[in-house]
Amino acid sequence: MAPRGWGCWRWAAQPRARLLSPAAAPLGFRQLLSTVELVPHICVVGSGPAGFYTAQHLLKHHPQARVDIYEKQVVPFGLVRFGVAPDHPEVKNVINTFTQTAHSTRCAFRGNVTVGRDVSVSELRDAYHAVVLSYGAEDHRTLGIPGEELPGVLSARAFVGWYNGLPENHKLTPNLNCDTALILGQGNVALDVARILLTPIELLEKTDITADALRVLRQSQVKRVWIVGRRGPLQVAFTIKELREMIHLPRSQALLDPADFEGLEDLIKEAPRPRKRLTELLVQTALKPPKGEKADGKAEAPRAWGLRFLRSPLKVLPSPDGGRVAGIRLAVMKLEGSGENAQAVPTGAVEDVPCGLVLSSVGYKSLPIDPTVPFDPKLGIIPNRNGRVSGAPGLYCSGWVKRGPSGVIATTMNDGFLTGQVLLQDLEEGVLPIGPKPGYSSIEPLLKNRGVQPVSFEDWEKLDAEEVAQGQAAGKPREKLVDPQQMLQLIGH
């Protein structure tokens, strides 16, 4: 059976660009083109992977299209810059592809422009033939439990943004003067956070982690990290690559209870191959003696991490003075059903776990961008069909705001390509207006009158060179700039 969307990919594989070329068009349409000079002006909101991959597809498959990419940050690349762990530099190689797209003479980056505040979606729709919303998931899902507001309780999203230099998080002050941290959630972000907390500082010094984060982590007292999930070993959301990194983390040991994996042998045999390999590695790790174990059974590794299954947060426990977190109360769960569809239900038992830091990694979520754009608050997405926004011709979406916060960069690439293909199909079939549109020439004076100073890709490259120079001086790949005002001053804004 062909995968979903295969019809669109078959369409993409055909030489459709010729149908958009004036020379190949029917005589009447060629005359129309020669009269109105059909040059599609398309706006993409968001410069993360979804935005850049959508732009890339549009530019590649339509020889006249012009694409403006709007971004609220001063700098481009979204979660590739602000979400990828600093010790995963290979994942950031996609920036090279995005840079090629940005260097196209038919593409322009408009940074430091917040759509929905500096310019409305309606104004963009008036100026462009099509608008693609690719702004991602800019918030986190809350726990909704008592004590969540206590100092020492942070979202994993904010913590990741802090050590990656996201401007809105650079003033975060995580208190790492505690022995134990607990992370709620068992996805890749949870393992990223655990790994950063436990990685030897001399290894982090070789990455592009921010100077402020490095300073705080150098003084960290965290020696143990628990990674807690509502369901069991067969439902963890992290990948085998991330798990291997945790298992081989220098000077750390895994704390896995063999009892958690009892009775899984038959279930593992029936699981899909990726899940089977992942669970087998968990079992092997659980049955191994702690690395560096001495004759008396005590481990020499100074730090440790562990997985706790079938636990759901009920309440954050305060310190005696009520001034910060001292622990968390977890409901003990049991599974009903099996496999990916297994549901966790409470048993009635509870467990209190002492800890001085709680990091919530239970998911990202998108936010509505503009009152005129449909939004499903329950699903956290813009209602759409294959990227076409429901009830709004000429408005499209791609990435997490289209499908929800799931998948890896390759998933987002395919998603962006599909939205781009749908848009081009609508353009070819006359769904979109064929008359001229002003594009950025009508938006630029609006921004100027509102005191907004857009940042170009050339401006970003000046900042990029400065970050690399500062990093080399500090013996690092780069030293990330985190203050937007400082960035604007460096480029003369």
Image (tube, helix red, strand yellow):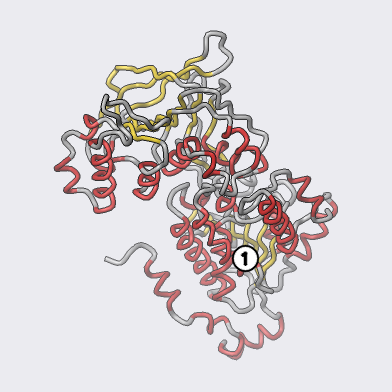
**Up/down of 355 relative to 122, above or below:** above
Residue drawn 62% across the image and 65% down it: 99
Above or below, 163 relative to 57: above
Is 352 left, or right, of 164 in this rendering? left
Instruction: Place residue 324 in its image quadrant.
Output: top right
Relative image position of residue 34 (x, y in whole percent): 69, 86
Q: Is residue 181 above or below residue 136?
A: above
Q: Residue at x 55, y 64 (%)?
A: 54
Residue lying at the far front in this picture: please name it: 295
On the image, which quarter does residue 23 sit in? bottom right
Q: Is residue 478 above or below residue 432?
A: above
Between residue 2 and residue 453, name the one nearer to us: 453
Q: Residue at x 64, y 56 (%)?
A: 76
**Front position in the image: 244 or 57:** 244
Q: Badge 1, how many Cα within 10 Å: few under 14, some, many 20+?
A: some
Residue 207 in view, yes or no: yes
The amino acid marked with disc number 1 is Thr
Query: Which residue position holds label 1?
Result: 99
Name which residue lies at 47% across and 65% down.
Answer: 418
